[in-house]
Amino acid sequence: MHFNAEELEKKGKLVKKDDRYEVYDVEMSNLVLSLTKLFPGKATSGHYHEESEEVYHFLSGRGRIKLGDKEYEAKAGDIFTVPKDTFHQVINTGEEVLKFIAVFEKYEGRGAKLKAIIPAAGHGTRFLPITKAQPKEMLPVFDKPVIQYVVEEALEAGIDNILIITGRGKRAIEDHFDRSPELEQFLEKAGKHEMLKEIRRISELANITYIRQKEALGLGHAVLQAREFVGNAYFAVLLGDVITSPPCIGEMLEIHRRFRASVIALQQVRREEVSKYGIAELGEALGNGVYELKDVVEKPSQEEAPSTLAITGRYILSSRIFEPLARGERGYGGEIQLTDAIRRLIQEGERVVGYIYPGRVFDIGNKLDWIKSTVLLSLESEFRQEIVDFLGDLELGR
Ligand code: UTP
């Protein structure tokens, strides 16, 4: 790339000017070229960028650049790369104006910490009558409600700003993550200190906000409720009734950072089952189970299904998804489908990649998966031997 300071100054938008410096930004497709004129004896600090590197190209003058705890001389022609998340500062040590250009990738939510949405407003009809008076997200899986596993998965990945989409009859979810002074007092008096610690830990887990989906019009409609909370940034979606083991969203965040794209978790299902899921059509392989996505289809027939790779309940999405969702088009079953909105994103040229997740996925909305997940987790607990003996005593298959 060839830089010309005069031209950049002419084309650029003056975004900052004070007694220290003048900054002109020029946007070029997905890049921003930021020309800085730093006055003699002055210094300027750059922001921390969580998600991208920045390249500093010095054009004229003399100075120094601090990158983390290292410091270097900088003069015309020098180029430095500022690694992600690194404090950096430029100091003009010369007699004349120090000119340099910072080049960085422009993308939504640059530098921002991702937020997570947990939709939990569905009716859970597959679990009636249990779900008549209690949310399926509160079903116990071994010793915790499903949704606690989901919140802990987000936290483990460093996402602590969480919005749970609830609806009528879902109060138990809010109560679960709230303080419970009477219960805490009771446990304290009864000397049950370990349990008290656990109860307090749950209420201090994360910064959780709630919003109600007034009518269960589908997963896409549930996600649309998060529009204001999300703003103009990528965000994670973790279905409130899906457990992944080992946790999937952390790996997806890495993929998102690498490809700067929306990421959808996928798993192989049997061909007879494709009509229960959103199914993906893969494009080019990008390595380590990651593929460009060409299309996604909600609940296709076996004949129409472009593959047997199903969307599994973990997503990282661009906030551009809200545009097709807000159009309110109804899809399969008369619902506003998230899969249909992802399809629109792809058609509109947004980059979406699929990650074939190699771990286990339990859809707790389905009875068989619920039982399997409890058995698996109990086998990882202190009851392991007793469960093994118990299953052995049943003389299964004999
Ligand atoms: P499901 O596809 O499991 O639908 O939703 P459901 O209505 O909850 O369950 P069934 O099929 O009637 O048994 C997947 C996720 O999306 C949420 C659900 O709470 C679940 O976490 N969801 C679904 C909403 O939040 N709102 C909706 O309108 C639909």
Image (spheres, rainbow, N blue to C red):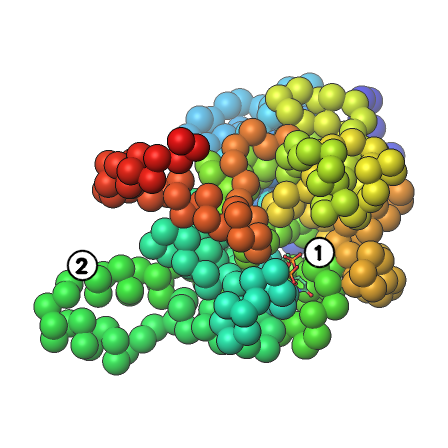
The mark nearer the N terminus, 1 or 2, is 2
Asked if the beta carbon under badge 1 is closer than 8 A to the nearest atom of ligand 1, the reply is no
Q: Is residue 191 visible?
A: yes
Name which residue lies at 68% across and 77% down: 214
Asked if the beta carbon under badge 2 is closer than 8 A to the nearest atom of ligand 1, the reply is no
- On screen, residue 85 versus residue 167, left or right, reads left
Image quadrant holding the N terminus, namely top right
Mark nearest the camera among 1 and 2 is 2
Measuring from the top left, give residue 156's x and y in whole percent: 43, 45
**Ligand 1 picture quarter:** bottom right
Mark 1 = which residue? 232
Numbered label attached to residue 194: 2
- The amino acid type of the residue labelled 2 equals Glu
Measuring from the top left, give residue 85's x and y in whole percent: 52, 37
- The amino acid type of the residue labelled 1 equals Asn
Measuring from the top left, give residue 229's x and y in whole percent: 63, 64
Measuring from the top left, give residue 237's x and y in whole percent: 62, 52
Numbered label attached to residue 86: none
Q: Residues within 10 Å of mark 1 (few under 14, many from 20)?
A: some
Q: Is residue 56 visible?
A: no
Q: Residue furthest bottom?
A: 182
Secondary element under disc 2, as helix, strand or loop, is helix
Could you give the CA–CA distance between mark 1 and mark 2, rounded to whole angstroms? 42 Å
